[in-house]
Image: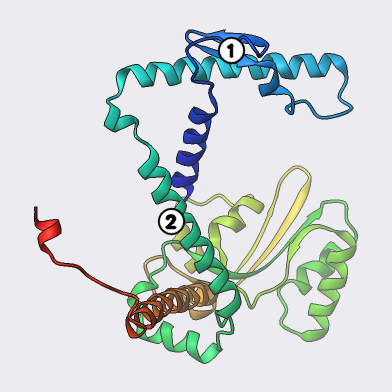
Amino acid sequence: MKHKILFLFSLLLICSCNTASEKDSNRIAIAKADNEYLYKDDIMDIVPQGIPTKDSADLIRKYIDNWIRESLVKQKAESNLTDEQKDVEKQLRDYRNSLITYTYEKELVKQKLDTVVADSEIEEYYNNNQSDFELKDNIIKVVYVKVDKKAPGIEKLKKWYKSDNLKDREQLASYCHQFASNFYLDDSSWLLFDDLLKEIPIQTYNKELFLQNNRFVEVSDSLNDYFVNIKGFKIRNSLSPLGFEKDNIKNIILNKRKLQLISKMKEDVYNDAANNKKIEIYSDEKYKK
């Protein structure tokens, strides 16, 4: 669709050039590019109301320069293409048909698609398609805190970030909202290990070995202390956990529903036309020749 839109814009730009090879004496010409003219009335609507005179003049000059360049290229194309290559009517017709169909399908999906996907459906798809869910990267469940070296209560923070005790977790959250410059406390969600490495100055040449041999990590730079509690991890090339793939699977299921909805619509349209005798196929002798 993106390529079709760009193609249409190109066609419209070509068609916008004045193709008259002779000057129209009844109009005021303001520019010429080889055999084509740009007239004053062609640019009447390009300048917004209220724009300063200088800006208006600059805008018009840029428009004229662009028109000349595009017109010259278009004329070059005209002189080097065959009549068959220059016939864009079929492309325009095909594009219009495609755009109308696409717009209708999009509206149909908007109105009719069931977007509720049950967790049981997601789990069933995951269990039946586990070969599709091999991890391409290392992922982790983690708690991490970045705090200024001069922040108060660092010793208590060292206890809290390691703890699974509910009261300690509440103390940690309160501390982070007051003093931490960055933190992540949702240890129920999976993150890419590489995303953590962007936040924490951990030096490692073997990420898998690092994850297998480290649980609590404390590092520093010139300004900050960093505290990391790796609550769980999965190594790349292993089976990706359901929680990490849930949104991806939901999108897959919705896309399948969308394709099924569109396919059923096309089949219903065809059957309705056939049942109402709106379809005729004439003798094949006409298209064998």
Q: Nearer the viewer, residue 125 or 143?
A: 125
Q: Does any portion of residue 43 appear in the rendered image?
A: yes
Residue 64 rendering spot, x and y as whole percentages: 64, 15
- Work out whether mark 2 precedes mark 1 in sequence or the reverse, and give the earlier one: 1
Residue appearing at x 60%, y 77% in the figure? 111
Q: Amino acid at mark 2?
A: Ser
Determine whether the residue tagged by mark 1 lies in a helix, strand or loop: loop
User: What is the C-alpha distance between the residues marked 2 and 1?
Assistant: 38 Å
Q: Nearer the viewer, residue 251 or 127?
A: 251
Residue appearing at x 37%, y 83% in the figure? 276
The image's mark for residue 147 is none
Question: Is residue 147 shown left or right of residue 10?
Answer: right
Residue 58 rendering spot, x and y as whole percentages: 75, 15
Q: Nearer the viewer, residue 103 or 221?
A: 103
Which residue is disc 1 drawn over? 24
Question: So how many labels did they put on this image?
Answer: 2
The image's mark for residue 98 is 2
Residue 226 rendering spot, x and y as whole percentages: 72, 57
